[in-house]
């Protein structure tokens, strides 16, 4: 079940993933793994559109550092 925590943060309890939206209205061009369990969506110009953190309940420190 997806839950919107803040305007730009959502959490999917079915897969234990947190997604932080940084920019909207731009198509995702590429997704890269930045750290283990942390994926970054990029626009064609290289700007960061969003960050997905898997196993979110184990990575609160990482999530807090982004927020």
Image (cartoon, rainbow, N blue to C red):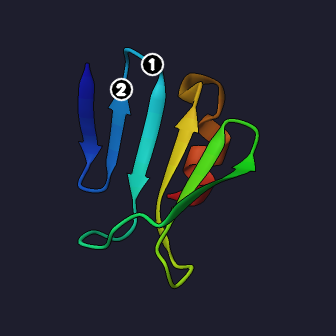
- The residue lying furthest to the top in this view is 14
Q: Residues within 10 Å of mark 2 (few under 14, many from 20)?
A: some
Q: Position of residue 39 (x, y in %)?
A: 60, 48
Decide if residue 34 is on the left or right side of residue 29: right
Residue that badge 2 annotates: 12
Q: Position of residue 40 (x, y in %)?
A: 57, 56
Residue at x-position 30% and y-position 56%: 8
Q: Secondary structure at mark 2?
A: strand
- The residue lying furthest to the bottom in this view is 45
Is 26 rendered above or below residue 17? below
Is 37 rendered above or below residue 65? above
Determine which quarter of the picture holds residue 46. bottom right
Q: Which numbered disc covers residue 29?
A: none
* Foreground of the two, 32 or 8: 32
Determine which quarter of the picture holds residue 49. bottom left
Is 47 rendered above or below residue 18? below
Q: Residues within 10 Å of mark 1 (few under 14, many from 20)?
A: few
Residue at x-position 36% and y-position 26%: 12
Q: Position of residue 1 (x, y in %)?
A: 26, 18
Q: Which numbered disc covers residue 15?
A: 1
Is 39 rendered above or below residue 53? below
- The residue lying furthest to the right in this view is 36
Determine which quarter of the picture holds residue 19. top left
Residue at x-position 35% and y-position 71%: 23
Q: Position of residue 6 (x, y in %)?
A: 27, 49
* Foreground of the two, 21 or 44: 44
* Foreground of the two, 14 or 42: 42
Decide if residue 10 is on the left or right side of residue 48: left
Are discs 1 and 2 less than 8 Å apart at CB? Answer: yes
Q: CA distance from mark 1 to mark 2?
A: 6 Å
Residue at x-position 27% and y-position 69%: 24
Q: Secondary structure at mark 1?
A: loop
């Amino acid at each position: 079940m997806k839950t919107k925590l803040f305007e730009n943060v959502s959490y999917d309890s079915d897969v234990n993933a947190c997604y932080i939206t940084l920019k909207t209205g731009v198509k995702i061009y590429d997704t890269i793994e930045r750290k283990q369990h942390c994926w970054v969506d990029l626009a064609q110009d290289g700007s960061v559109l969003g960050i997905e953190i898997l196993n979110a309940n184990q990575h609160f420190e990482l999530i807090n550092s982004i927020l």
